[in-house]
Amino acid sequence: MGNSFKNAQFLMDSRFADAARGDGDALYDLGICYQTGTAGVGVDLIEAHKWFNLAAGAGLEAAQDARAEVAEELTAREISRAQAAARAWLGSMQQRAA
């Protein structure tokens, strides 16, 4: 069990690092993790929407479909929270790059 947790943590850490570099596939993968509750994270559809939104902004068409699928399960307020979280993440990445 310890190794599977370490592997999951390594996967998430590497995906976050790749996402911070603007890797659209990493953004999409993070959305999948939160949508399905894999890689050591719980299901969080607001967080999934955030990552799919960022991946869609990076040009991944599959992320647009995934974002729409997740949005069907969310309220308008939850979608607004996800969008605000995506904007905040982008802002933090811009500050980090400066």
Image (cartoon, grey):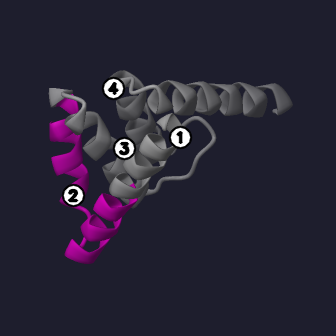
Mark 2 touches mark 1? (CB < 8 Å): no
Disc 2 packing (10 Å; few <14; some 14–19; many ≥20): some
**Residue closer to the observer: 23 or 98:** 98
In the rendered structure, which segment of residues is drawn in magenta? 62-85
Judge from the rendering whether residue 38 lies leftward or rightward of residue 64; answer left or right: right
**Residue closer to the observer: 78 or 41:** 78
**Cα separation between marks 1 and 4:** 18 Å
Judge from the rendering whether residue 34 lies leftward or rightward of residue 24; answer left or right: right
Instruction: Please identify the quadrant where the N terminus is shown.
Output: top right
- Pointer 1 residue: 96
Residue type beneath disc 3: Trp
Q: Could you tell me residue 15's position as x and y percent?
A: 53, 28
**Cα separation between marks 1 and 3:** 18 Å
**Cα separation between marks 3 and 2:** 12 Å
Q: Secondary structure at mark 3?
A: helix
Disc 3 packing (10 Å; few <14; some 14–19; many ≥20): many
Mark 1 touches mark 4? (CB < 8 Å): no
Judge from the rendering whether residue 87 lies leftward or rightward of residue 92; answer left or right: left
Residue 24: mark = 4
Residue at 84% x, 32% y is 2
Residue type beneath disc 4: Gly
